[in-house]
Image (cartoon, rainbow, N blue to C red):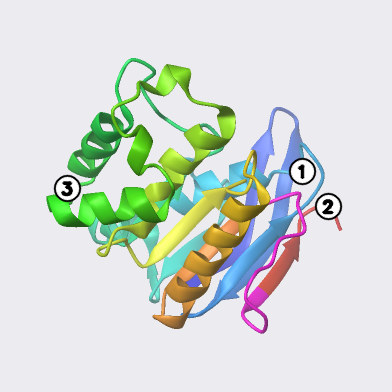
Amino acid sequence: MLEARELACMKGPRWLLRDVAFCVDPGEVLWIEGRNGSGKTTLLRMLCGLTPPDEGVIRWDGQPIRDAGETYRRELLYLGHANALKDDLTIEENLRFAMQLAGRATLSDEFDAVLAQCGLADRRELPVRVLSQGQRRRVALSRLWFADAPKLWILDEPFAALDAESVQRLSDRLGRHLEAGGLAVLTTHQEVPLPAGRVRRLRLDA
């Protein structure tokens, strides 16, 4: 379970977030909504431990994430708004590098299957610099398809730049993750087909 209580964050002289609270259980996704500048990305960074809150606490399975340390980070997969890809590396090189950084071994057969499921198999040797924005986003998101993907996904605008087919593909993958007891926290400005009955919503500018 991921839980936040009385979270607050200041930006300069004002409160960007204050008294934010929620709970996400296994099999659920938290959809964070709000206008630009309302603190959505800041809240995601707080959940990842990248931005410490000025007030409040975030707990994973009852333990504050600042105390859980590496145990919590092993359970977490964060995909930011930027794709974090190297333009001069190929799709395959980028993904293998990302998986190595995460300390996750990848078998060749599984790697082939993931690229095929994400519609990238025929582009694996292309440098990222020649890809469209939608293709780049699919490369970054393909990490979600590996069998040992962590339990908690934190996704900043994952549906941005995707075509209708890719939106449905990601929604289906998210649904399978939740059915397996995974959790997700995401932001999106789009109305997307998220799994019915598994979505909690949090609006920051309410």
Tell me which numbered mark, 2 or 1, is placed earlier along the sequence.
Answer: 1
Mark number, residue 38 = 1
Across and down, in percent, residue 29 comes to 58, 70
- Residue drawn at x 52%, y 32% is 82
Quarter residue 63 falls in:
bottom left
Q: Which amino acid lies under the numbered mark 2 shown in the image of this protein?
A: Asp
Residue 1 visible in the picture: no
Looking at the rendered structure, the secondary structure element under dot 1 is: loop
Residue 54 visible in the picture: yes
Across and down, in percent, residue 20 comes to 68, 61
Across and down, in percent, residue 15 comes to 74, 42
Q: Is residue 194 magenta?
A: yes
Front residue of this view, candidates 36 and 87:
87
Q: Which residue is mark 3?
A: 103
Front residue of this view, candidates 58 and 1:
1
Horizontal arrangement in the rendering, residue 64 relative to residue 19 (left or right): left
- Residue drawn at x 62%, y 44% is 162
* Residue that sits furthest to the right in the current view: 206
Q: Which amino acid lies under the numbered mark 3 shown in the image of this protein?
A: Gly
Asked if disc 2 and disc 1 are in contact, CB closer than 8 Å, the reply is yes
Looking at the rendered structure, the secondary structure element under dot 3 is: loop
Query: For mark 1, does the 10 Å Cα neighbourhood hold few (<14), some (14 to 19), or many (20 or more) residues?
Result: some
In this rendering, the answer to whether 186 lies above or below 95 is: below
Looking at the rendered structure, the secondary structure element under dot 2 is: loop
Stretch of the chain drawn in magenta: 188-199
Front residue of this view, candidates 134 and 41:
134
Asked if disc 3 and disc 2 are in contact, CB closer than 8 Å, the reply is no
Front residue of this view, candidates 2 and 163:
163
In this rendering, the answer to whether 164 lies above or below 95 is: below
